[in-house]
Image (cartoon, grey):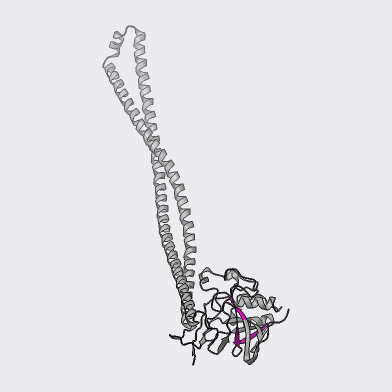
Amino acid sequence: MPILLMVGWILVIRNKPISLRNKTYRVLLGVCAVLVAIASSFQLTGSAVYADQYDDQINAIQNEVNQYQSQADKYHKKANSLQAAVSALTAEKNAIQAQLDLSQAKFDKLTTDIAKNKIKMKDNQKALGDIIADLYVDGEISPLEMLASSKNVGEYMDKNTYQSSVRDKLNSTINEIKSLKEKLERDQREVKKILNQQKSQRAALAAKEAQKQQLLNQTRGNEATYKKKVAEGQAQMAAVAAEQQAALARATGGGAYNYGTIGSFQFRNYSGNMGCSGGYSYCGPQDSYSDPWGLYNRECVSYTAWGVVNRFNKYVTNFAGAGNAYQWPSTAQSMGAYTDHTPSVGSVAILPSTPGFSPIGHAMLVESIQGGGWVHVSQYNFGGTGEYSTMDIQSSGVVFVHFRDR
């Protein structure tokens, strides 16, 4: 008696409009088909492989990746705001530094002028000392003696005039020096006050800048951490997908078997993958863009929507984000379609979210009706490779969506 191998395979995606696509989902997008369970007359070793053992892992990892991406986006936004704040503080600090440099130059000049003034004062003090000494010597001589020592009255008058002139000049010089000294010292105090204020402003700005920079570094670090977690999650999902592919190869004997059963669902005469054929129009890399119905290319739903419209002239509009296979029976009603369990050529066969096909189901295009409840269908992405294939399915337990004619 042949052993029935029950295998399901599905990668979790959401067939939403391209505008809602998020890079975080890229590892998962592209698979809305199932890895079929193959019933074979050959004896195979090992236990059956079920979709849920992979689906649960992928769902859990996807949820984590979504959370990590959300945190990374939040920190990225915060980091950009902090970077702007740091740049503004740096510019303000540089402006203060320019003012401080100017004030420092003024202060240095005043310091030099004060030093020169001190030297000038010392020179004048020495000159004053010499003149006072001369006056003192002359002061020891009485006017009568000065007159007697003079050659004439004119010389005597010249001496008195000279002494008076020297005294006046000394007084004027001393007053100028004192006035300049007071002015220079006053200016220096004022500039020093400005310097201290500017240094305080610079220190405050530098402290704020350092604080913001530290917070920015922490935020960038947090962002990098969550981006790393996103990348790790994507790598984990890729590993699970590879494991599913390997399970498919093991279960089908490398493609040697073409019929099987999953739960109540039965299929036979599976053609195997045939590339991007069947007349389908959107043969770019899988999930690289959306079709006119808001569904990612080379998915089961994209192919069936294309076939219903272009091969059977039916009316199908954009699914507006509700285009997963399991959603079709309810979404299509808004397009005037109806559902039942009776197949018709040009209708869409939906495998709903039943065990082995959770959580999103699978969509196939009905090509012909055969006897004994068998229906011949065409499809894309059966097995998760984004390729065209055909097979026969039992209509029992399958929902059929009938779109209205255009």
| Region of the chain picked out in magenta, as a range | 378-406
In the displayed image of the protein, which residue is found farthest to the top? 151
From this view, report whether residue 15 is shown above or below residue 113: below
Say above or below: 322 vs 206: below
Quadrant holding the C terminus = bottom right
Residue 275 visible in the current orientation: yes
Along the line of sight, the residue nearer the viewer: 387 or 111: 387
The answer to whether residue 258 is magenta is no
Residue 390: say if magenta: yes
Towards the viewer: 132 or 75: 75
Q: Residue at x 50, y 84 (%)?
A: 7
Where residue 132 appears, as percent x and y from the top left, is 30, 21
- Residue 206 shown left or right of residue 282 in the figure: left
Q: Nearer the viewer, residue 90 or 200?
A: 90
369 on left or right of 98:
right
Please tell me whether residue 400 is drawn above or below residue 71 in the rendered image: below
For image coordinates 51% across by 70% down, the residue present is 24
Tally of marks: 0
Please state the horizontal and vertical placement of residue 219, each as a whole percent of the image: 43, 63
Percent x, y of residue 371: 64, 91
Is residue 319 left or right of 107 when viewed as pictured?
Answer: right
Instruction: State the residue lying farthest toward the right.
Output: 406
> In the depicted view, which residue is nearer to us: 147 or 394?
394
